[in-house]
């Protein structure tokens, strides 16, 4: 299993070796050589980190859009959870899961998309860990070189230091005080940047509705557990790996600060500040919507009555009865003639009968 894992990481290790060697060649040309060779290799790791994070920018953008969609659908998610609250039978659980999956499908959201950058960055991290961890064995001739980092180059890397520490040294694998101090400082920086990154994400870029759910509570717990985990595991990391991890955390902080300021989650504190900035500049804030939720909102508007008055349904009999009463109640239909004998408001038919009956009597009188 270990051999299979190493075979998968080998192409990544080979690529990282070439990137580090290329950056070192540039830094060597600008004067970082001799006693400063250690700094050239340290800056090469920083350059490698920047290259890796640039390659991951498309995935980061996808993560941001996915996170915003997940935050926007939280009200609908809470409605589904409230609907099946307290129902533990298999049928209800199955129906709840079906509605949640349908919500994900309609809105095009995926709860695992936010984990993609971290998961895809892990192979680069493990490959660099192996690359730096094997430098000592390569320098001693116990392991083969990797690409441009031959055994001679490995010996040169092992012979260079920064603040008296070699890149392959770790807090637990060395007795040198300078190495332990440098490793401790990098571990603290790594843990602090990890905490700051998650803290600004939860406090500034999450709406209040998104913070009141089990998933957010788990994130709050991880907010304090992750720095402790990195502090414990960091004592086993080589100095070069600590430089890589601290640099990638600083990159994440800057990238996240830009996103929170310019693409905040709706309903969050950062979104309110963006609206205030837009109002001061006389601009209209462009609201973010999810297509699947827009359809539901439009359907709800069409089903609701447009006027504020209550519309009472009428039956067919009631409609006919009211029409007959209006025609017989004195309002004459168009084209009706008023008879002289009908009287005020009297019906027209009896008046016609009386006129017919008077005609014979008037003839006899004339005769």
Image (cartoon, grey):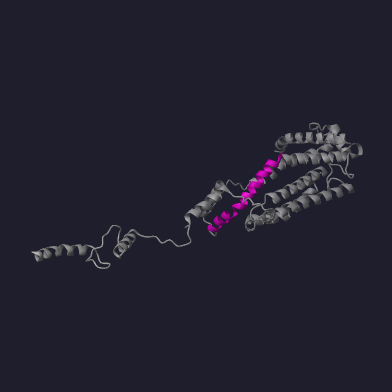
In the shown orientation, is residue 227 left or right of residue 113? Answer: right
Q: How would you classify the magenta stretch by its main secondary structure?
A: helix
**254 or 233: which is nearer to us?**
254
Residue 347 x/y as whole percent: 24, 65
Q: Is residue 188 visible?
A: yes
Q: What's drawn in magenta, residue-wise? A: 55-84
Name the residue rendered at 28%, 57% in the picture: 335
Name the residue rendered at 23%, 65% in the picture: 340
* Number of numbered labels in the structure image: 0
Question: Does the magenta-highlighted stretch encompass residue 91?
Answer: no
Residue 157 x/y as whole percent: 86, 37
Position above or below: 43 against 284: above
Position above or below: 142 against 351: above
**5 or 180: which is nearer to us?**
180
Q: Quadrant of the N terminus?
A: top right
Residue 152 lies in quadrant: top right
Question: Does the magenta-highlighted stretch encompass residue 74?
Answer: yes
In the shown orientation, is residue 39 left or right of residue 57? Answer: right
Name the residue rendered at 90%, 39% in the picture: 36
**338 or 179: which is nearer to us?**
338
- Residue farthest to the left, as pictured: 367
- Residue farthest to the right, as pictured: 35
Residue 263 x/y as whole percent: 67, 49
In the shown orientation, is residue 342 left or right of residue 304? Answer: left
- Residue farthest to the bottom, as pictured: 344
Q: Quadrant of the C terminus?
A: bottom left
Position above or below: 354 against 168: below
Residue 227 x/y as whole percent: 75, 53
**318 or 294: which is nearer to us?**
318
């Amino acid at each position: 299993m270990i051999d299979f894992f190493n075979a998968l990481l080998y192409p990544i290790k080979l690529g990282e070796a070439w990137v580090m060697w290329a950056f070192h060649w540039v830094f060597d040309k600008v004067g970082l050589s001799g006693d400063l060779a250690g700094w050239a290799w340290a800056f090469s790791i920083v350059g490698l980190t920047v290259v890796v994070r640039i390659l991951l920018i498309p995935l980061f953008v996808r993560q941001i859009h996915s996170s915003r969609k997940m935050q926007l659908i939280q009200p609908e998610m809470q409605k589904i959870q409230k609907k099946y609250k307290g129902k533990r039978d298999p049928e209800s659980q199955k129906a709840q899961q079906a509605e949640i999956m349908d919500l994900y499908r309609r809105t095009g959201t995926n709860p695992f998309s936010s984990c993609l950058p971290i998961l895809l960055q892990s192979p680069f991290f493990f490959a660099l860990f192996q690359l730096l961890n094997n430098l000592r064995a390569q320098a001693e001739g116990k392991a083969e070189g990797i690409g441009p980092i031959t055994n001679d180059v490995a010996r040169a890397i092992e012979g260079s230091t920064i603040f008296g520490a070699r890149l392959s040294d770790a807090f637990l694998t060395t007795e040198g005080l300078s190495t332990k101090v440098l490793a401790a400082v990098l571990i603290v920086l790594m843990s602090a940047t990890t905490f700051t990154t998650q803290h600004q994400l939860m406090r500034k870029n999450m709406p209040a509705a998104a913070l009141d759910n089990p998933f957010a509570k788990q994130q709050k717990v991880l907010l304090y557990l992750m720095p402790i985990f990195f502090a414990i595991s960091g004592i086993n990391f080589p100095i070069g790996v600590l430089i890589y991890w601290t640099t990638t955390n600083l990159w994440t902080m800057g990238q996240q600060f830009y996103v929170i300021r310019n693409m905040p989650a709706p309903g969050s504190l950062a979104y309110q500040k963006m609206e205030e900035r837009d109002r001061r500049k006389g601009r209209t804030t462009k609201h973010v919507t999810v297509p699947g939720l827009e359809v539901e909102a439009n359907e709800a508007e069409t089903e609701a009555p447009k006027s504020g008055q209550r519309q009472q349904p009428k039956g067919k009999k009631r409609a006919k009865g009211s029409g007959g009463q209006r025609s017989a109640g004195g309002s004459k239909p168009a084209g009706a003639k008023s008879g002289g004998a009908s009287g005020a408001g009297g019906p027209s038919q009896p008046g016609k009968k009386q006129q017919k009956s008077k005609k014979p009597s008037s003839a006899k009188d004339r005769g």
